Amino acid sequence: MNNRPTVIDYLIHAKYFVQILLSFTMLALRRGPVSLLRDMRRYPWLFTLLRAPLLMGRLAAGRAGLYREANELLISFIVRRMVGLLVRALERGDTFILHQEMVPPEISTAMGLSVWPAELLSILLPLLDSHAAEEYIDCSENEGIPPDICSHVKMTLGIVLSGQMPPSSVIVSSNLPCDGNMTGYEITRRWNNASIYRLDIPFNFYDDRAAEYFAGELRRMIAWLEENTPGRMDWERLKQICEERNRMAEIEIELWEMISARPAPMAAEPVYLGHLWSFNADPGRPEATRFFRRIADMTRRNLEAGVRAVPNERFRAVLWNPPLLHFSELFRWAEEAYGITLVIDSMTYNSQPLIDTATPDTMLRDLGKIIMQGPMARHTRGPAENYIDDIFRIYHRFDLDMVWVAGHIGCKNTMALNQMLREACREKGVPLLIIEYDLSDQRICSHEGIIRQIDHFMQNVMKVGRNGKEHATREAVASNVTADACASHLEE
Amino acid sequence: MNQYAGISLFDDLLAEPLNRLAEQAMGEGRVPVGYTCSYVPETLLSAGKLFPVRLRAPGIAGTEMADTYMSNVICSYTKSLLEFAIGGAYDRLGGVVFTANCDHMRRLMDNLEYLRKPAFSHTLDVPHKRGGPALDWFTEELKMLADKMSAHFGVSAAGDDLAAAIRSRNAFAEALRAIGDLRKLDPPLITGGEFHRVMIASLVSPKDLLMPLVEDFRRRAVERGGVGPYRARIMVAGGELDDLSFIDVIESQGGLVVADRFCTGSLPGLEPVPESGDPLRAIAQHTLYKVLCPRMMEEFDEREEAIRQTALEYRADGVIIQAIKFCDTWGVEGSTLTAALRSAGIPVLRLEREYRHGGEGQLRTRVQAFIESMGK
């Protein structure tokens, strides 16, 4: 099998390139030349967004067929949807509000409000430009935010403090996913001189009492939004949104079934980045459902034709914790260098995906459960077993060979669990790589540094060299996952 | 500034996680229950034969094992507790009550349960805001803890028994408040270092056994007259602080610490718990409203105002905001708070520190510079 792109691959690439250009043109037309120039001066990150075709090129390079096209579809879809969000953000009507990433957007959307996810830029910009986060992180630290706070939080605050966050007089935030994020919203509030509603999400979230409390919080949020914005709750609209979200979730479950196959017919960015965008920025939008259906169709076609996403698939991995934002081509590199297929990631795997749309109460309860029991909440706040047991659950469900943990130095929640995880993995014979790095700031650990960690793990634990050089058989690898091997990697 | 010679009695009580008064109580059949955070109501842990002991790691030399488990980016208070726990320092406690209050505390709890599970443990899920629903939730949380303690220890933590515990708590808190008020005078009758010792001793000792020492200290302080000389009156705000030498170093540079608005300090936590109505609800309300920690999402303005009012009331010339390194809540809030207080004309020194005593030279230099910057 080879993954050399064909002429058709290049033509398809050109098609998506044109689609991206059309999206940018749409933005220019909607804003008009004068407003757009003013926007670009006020929001310099708009220039970074223009790099989307380059990101598409990086993800497509070295990939072929439907897997390649799925990556191209993904980027063009995100650009198109981002342009839609941008138009609303830049127009800043009185329905424009700022949401923290753990607040379910379905409700505000059903109220007729335009939601801008405050952390959106902190996710997208480093994907597009490895260095994009640095000026905002520096800005944040210069304003007194301690360097040890999560760089994702610092970047978001830096965007706020440098005046580059679209301003809003209404904000909804929560106590998730971590203390740094939660506390930082006071800065965002003060900077915007905004009114804010803060959702309180319980720690013990597995019982009806917690579900009821949080559903109550969502009800109070709705009442507050009705007082502070022109938005009005439209329960029928919420039902439609939840049903649409359910359809997307069902397609995603089908996708998971298909990628459980060995070798995987689809992998990496279309799976994890597709989820990250669709379920966080666009849930309940028909466009997002259509995107997921197309990804699932491509996957099915590959599966039925016996086509692997990664032609030389030798190892299957899960990525735990948020993806390495500033190293967007990492998995493409890992595919080429070691035949590693990233099958799924922890942020994608939500064990509570569907919403009962029977009544407003059931919708609020289940939307609440999606947040409370969603990956970020489960893993960063809930008891340790949430974090560790989920890893083994996914490891078996997707027939994996190794676990990669993105050991973001700023995520204290998960850093404090890694030793327990190491010991659990040793006990179960699960190869574990903890990549020590920073989520958004590659000055902490460069791409070369990340690659060195992976090389070291692959050679010492998995006993293979790059490009298929054998260091041991796969069977031998399984029996060779020893505490010493893991420890020697980690000590480095 | 000279300290009262009898203060060494309090120093003795603070040298070990379980002091001689705790040992004495245990000898009488009473049971110490550890806790880690101000959001655990001491009153509830005082039911029947129980008495609360705030977990400390006095004299800790290093956190090598805890670093392995909790990493090097976690607050050194929680790591110090884990290190002591691994070494068995808390094995004689009847149990430990945690809160899910911050990322570090939660992971301490996870690691402690994994490495050395306490005989009895419970985690309070404290809401991140106030108001009716949150108060209901927290009252239920306390009820669950009370029921669990009743089942495990065979004590009654409800009704009249709990009301009696509230009255005892209020009487003891009033005694401490009377001592704390001596700092308002000019010159104050006690040093900040002395009061810090009394406060920390009150968190780790059975209160009935400590009461005679507290009363004796107050009597002698009044007899002694004012302390001094000093260059500036300082208020210390921030997070967990039980390192006795921290305030001593500030005072050694002429900065008399007259107000303690940190989580192991007296302000405003010593205010009385209402003695009427449902005792559990009264405790829940007192806890949610009198502990001013930035882990509460909605009360920044109140916390800022509390510092300003306290500084005014105690005639503080400046405020030191101290937090243990890697504390996210105080880390982020510290930047906002510093800017807000400075814009209100209050001199602020912001310090990051480790749980255990260290960096004394740097601390001296920064305090000296701060006092000089105030023109004192």
Image: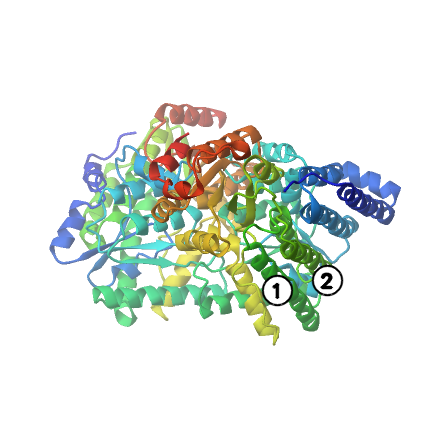
Which comes sooner in the sequence, label 2 or label 1? Answer: 1
Name the image quarter holding the C terminus of chain A.
Answer: top left
Instruction: Answer with the quarter of the image where residue B85 lies.
Output: top left
Q: Please, which chain is the residue tagged with disc 1 on?
A: A
Q: Mark 2 points at which residue?
A: A286
Q: Nearer the viewer, mark 2 or mark 1?
A: 1
Name the image quarter holding the N terminus of chain A.
Answer: top right
Q: How crowded is mark 2: few (under 14 residues within 10 Å), some or many (20 or more)?
A: some
Specify whether A317 is left or right of B101: right
- Residue B148 tag number: none
Q: In this view, does A252 lie above or below A189?
A: below
Name which residue type carries label 2: Pro
Nearest the viewer among A70 and B18 is A70
Q: Please, which chain is the residue tagged with disc 2 on?
A: A
Residue B127 x, y percent position in the rendering: 46, 59
Instruction: Answer with the quarter of the image where residue B193 lies.
Output: top left
Furthest residue toward front: A1
Q: Name the residue under label 1.
A: A250
Furthest residue toward bottom: A358
Residue B312 x, y percent position in the rendering: 47, 42
Nearest the viewer among A475 and A434 is A475
- Asked whether residue B191 appears in the rendered view, the answer is no
Q: Please tell me whether mark 2 sits on a helix, a strand or a loop.
A: helix
Name which residue type carries label 1: Glu
Q: Please tell me whether mark 1 sits on a helix, a strand or a loop.
A: helix
Nearest the viewer among A375 and A88 is A375
